[in-house]
Image (tube, coloured by chain):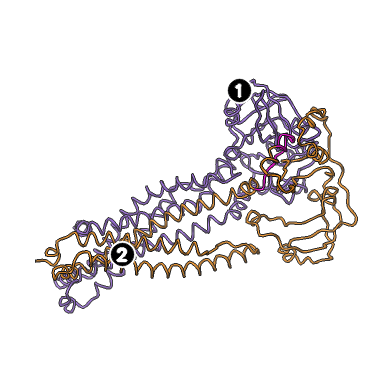
């Protein structure tokens, strides 16, 4: 009965209701986007880091992976040390270098990764075989753009190797998806010793990823590694996520500011609409009160009206928010150097639930205040007051 | 200006030769190409220049109480061999947004000192060429590219474009957010205008019935809408300027930098005010149309 009255009142002022719905849905969309943004990077980064099953990263002490040109010396010794640490199951070493890739008359720039073929820590093989001596794996984009197929002969030359050219002739053995590479980045993976020779890096690596047993604690294993290999830094997935949070704090701060603005806009909009709506109905409300309808019923009716308006706006806003998040994600996808698998806006149940709860809460309070005020007016004076 | 950028490592002497021979691309091709060098090809052992003078950026020096004349240990590898260096200068780092979140400090060495310390006496990460008057950067870059296969030759414009890529994305993101905010603001303004005008529908109907034309009433309402938008816009600009000052104060202190994070320019002010005015007039026009399109006799409840 009360709901029917609320809906009828809203329908009676269709234009006002429509505008309020648009306003609330836009504000909800912005709020949802900001809630998605505030936790999206963290969720997405954690998923990406955990995707290949390596719980610990190792870099030269004082650095983070690929942040500087510092290298870890004596990888074979380090590998033996790491495998001796209780809980360590496998080690995936990595070395990077820029190369010029030539296939016939065509050439392209690519980022070469020296890896251990037994550990697929950075790629997911889509076709063919892992790298081996004289055989490399290329990423899908590079294979497509340079017309490379399994078996194609290519020449890799170290970029910048002027004067003393460093080249190696290899065949394409497989095509893979490189999970940490940036959008548009061209990657070729070859066995670590081949790249070490090509780049003149001796037995050095840039960093390594460590697989640990299911029962091992990453923090404890990291501490044990640091104790045995003091020249390396260890990073757990949580540690790297924390560092990423600190570096990309701008997006979190922006999401807090704009989320607050969206909440304030919702409160102002619903509050204004309800205040005007109640002002229009002073006489009616006084008459209802004179007929014996309780204050509680009056307050509940107006709060209900506000809630219905907010709920409908929130429902529309969630859809709109998902659409705008997709658009904003497309804008941010252009970030240079960011792994293609990273998402800024991650849609999850808690974010949607929080956005709806905030809008409904704000809507209820925004409706409650004018309703409470009018419910406490003096009936006889209000009955003599002319409605606008 | 042109920047030459060997992505990882370059033979310094080889580059110098190639530049001198730039018009003759075969100068390099004629050199014998070495295949993959044998294993164990390691860099030249690092050595300690004596004396070794360095300059350190001011924020790092301030955080760690480092002053001119202090002696520090520096080395090419963490926990590896170190050399004693004397701090010769403290410098204010160039405001660079790309370095804001980097944890490592900027330290300046003389080129030969760093090359010796790193054990890379013939290597450079990149270098910049000054051009003689009249030499166009694009044409010279193209000629050098042909002579320096394996290296990147970039004009200043290209370097700027690459360095700005991140900030262009952030700018586009801000633009998109601004449009969403504008839509939200526009809807809010329209609501307020509809409600304000709606409150006066009987008074306006009465005025129409006593002979005041719809056009005159429309002008009044539009003028009022424009005034409200201007006043609101002015207040908003003031609020924006305060917010901008707060943003700059907070982030400058947080990152210990002289960077300007939020810049309020006359262009921004004019654009913001023009948008507020346009949205106000638009909302007023919609409200006026709705008000004047109904029969005044119906409105006053004949």
Nearer-the-camera pick, A110 or A195: A110
**Residue, disc 1:** A149
**Residue, disc 2:** B192
Report x, y in % for residue B284. Answer: 29, 63
Report x, y in % for residue A173. Answer: 65, 23
Residue A335 at least partly seen: yes
Say left or right for A118 vs B67: left
Where disc 1 sits, the SS reads: loop
Residue B153 lies within the magenta run:
yes
In the image, farthest residue toward the right: B50
Q: Quadrant of the C terminus of chain A?
A: bottom left
Magenta part of the chain:
B143-156
The chain to which mark 1 is attached is A
Task: Give the drawing colour for chain A.
Answer: purple
Nearer-the-camera pick, B78 or A250: A250
Task: Give the drawing colour for chain B.
Answer: orange
Q: CA distance from mark 2 to mark 1?
A: 64 Å
Report x, y in % for residue B128. Answer: 74, 47
Report x, y in % for residue A36. Answer: 47, 51
Marks 2 and 1: which is nearer the front?
A: 2
Nearer-the-camera pick, A278 or B17: B17
Residue A93 at least partly seen: no
Are there few (<14), some (14-19), or many (20+) residues within 10 Å of tag 1? Answer: some
The residue sitting at 51% across, 58% down in the picture is A254
Establish whether labels 2 and 1 are both on one chain: no
Residue B197, picture quadrant: bottom left
Say left or right for B250 vs A197: left
């Amino acid at each position: 009965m009360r709901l029917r009255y609320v809906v009828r009142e809203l329908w009676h002022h269709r234009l006002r209701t429509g505008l309020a719905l648009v306003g609330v849905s836009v504000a909800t969309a912005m709020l949802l986007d900001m809630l998605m943004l505030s936790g999206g990077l963290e969720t997405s980064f954690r998923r990406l880091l955990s995707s290949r099953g390596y719980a610990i990263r190792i870099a030269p002490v004082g650095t983070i992976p690929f942040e500087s040109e510092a290298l870890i010396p004596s990888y074979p010794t380090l590998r033996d040390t790491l495998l001796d640490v209780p809980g360590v199951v496998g080690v995936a070493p990595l070395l990077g270098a820029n190369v010029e890739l030539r296939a016939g008359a065509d050439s392209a720039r690519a980022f070469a990764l020296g890896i251990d073929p037994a550990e697929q820590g950075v790629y997911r093989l889509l076709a063919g075989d892992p790298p081996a001596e004289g055989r490399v794996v290329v990423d899908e984009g590079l294979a497509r753009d340079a017309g490379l197929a399994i078996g194609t002969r290519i020449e890799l030359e170290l970029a910048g190797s002027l004067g003393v050219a460093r080249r190696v002739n290899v065949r394409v053995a497989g095509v893979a998806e490189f999970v940490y590479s940036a959008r548009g980045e061209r990657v070729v993976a070859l066995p670590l010793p081949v790249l070490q020779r090509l780049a003149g890096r001796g037995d050095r690596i840039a960093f390594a990823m460590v697989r640990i047993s299911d029962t091992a604690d990453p923090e404890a294993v990291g501490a044990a590694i640091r104790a045995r290999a003091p020249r390396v830094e260890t990073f757990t997935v949580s540690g790297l996520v924390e560092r990423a949070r600190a570096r990309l704090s701008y997006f979190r701060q922006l999401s807090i500011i704009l989320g607050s603005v969206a909440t304030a806009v919702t409160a102002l909009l619903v509050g204004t609409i309800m205040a005007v709506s109640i002002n229009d109905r002073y006489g009616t409300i006084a008459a209802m009160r004179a007929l014996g309808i309780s204050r509680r019923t009056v307050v509940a009716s107006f709060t209900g009206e506000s809630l219905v308006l907010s709920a409908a706006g929130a429902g529309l806003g969630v859809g709109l928010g998902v659409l705008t998040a997709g658009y904003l994600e497309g804008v941010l996808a252009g970030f240079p150097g960011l792994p293609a698998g990273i998402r800024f806006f991650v849609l999850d149940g808690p974010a949607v639930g929080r956005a709806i709860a905030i809008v409904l809460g704000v809507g209820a309070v925004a409706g409650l205040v004018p309703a409470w005020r009018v419910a406490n007016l003096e009936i006889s004076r209000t009955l003599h007051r002319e409605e606008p | 200006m042109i920047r030459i950028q060997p992505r990882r490592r370059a033979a310094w002497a080889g580059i110098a030769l190639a530049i001198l021979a730039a018009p003759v691309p075969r100068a390099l091709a004629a050199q014998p190409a070495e295949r993959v060098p044998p294993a164990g090809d390691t860099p030249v052992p690092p050595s300690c220049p004596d004396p070794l003078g360095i300059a350190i950026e001011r924020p790092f020096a301030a955080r760690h109480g480092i002053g001119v004349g202090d002696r520090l240990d520096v080395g090419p590898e963490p926990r590896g061999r170190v050399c004693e260096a004397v701090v010769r200068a403290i410098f204010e780092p160039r405001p660079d947004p790309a370095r804001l979140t980097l944890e490592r400090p900027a330290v300046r060495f003389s080129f030969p000192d760093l090359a010796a310390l790193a054990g890379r006496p013939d290597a450079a990460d990149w270098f910049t060429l000054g051009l003689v008057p009249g030499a166009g950067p694009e044409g010279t870059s193209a000629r050098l590219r042909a002579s320096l296969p394996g290296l990147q030759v970039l004009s200043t414009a290209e370097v700027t474009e690459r360095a700005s890529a991140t900030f262009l994305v952030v700018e586009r993101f801000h633009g998109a957010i601004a449009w969403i905010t504008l839509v939200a603001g526009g809807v809010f303004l329209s609501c307020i205008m509809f409600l304000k005008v709606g409150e006066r529908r009987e008074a306006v109907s009465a005025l129409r019935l006593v002979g005041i034309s719809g056009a005159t009433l429309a002008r009044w309402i539009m003028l009022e809408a424009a005034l409200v938008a201007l006043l609101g816009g002015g207040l908003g600009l003031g609020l924006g300027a305060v917010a901008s000052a707060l943003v700059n104060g907070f982030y400058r202190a947080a990152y210990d930098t002289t960077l300007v994070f939020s810049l309020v320019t006359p262009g921004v002010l004019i654009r913001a005010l023009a948008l507020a005015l346009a949205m106000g007039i638009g909302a007023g026009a919609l409200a006026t149309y709705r008000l004047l399109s109904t029969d005044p006799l119906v409105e006053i409840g004949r």
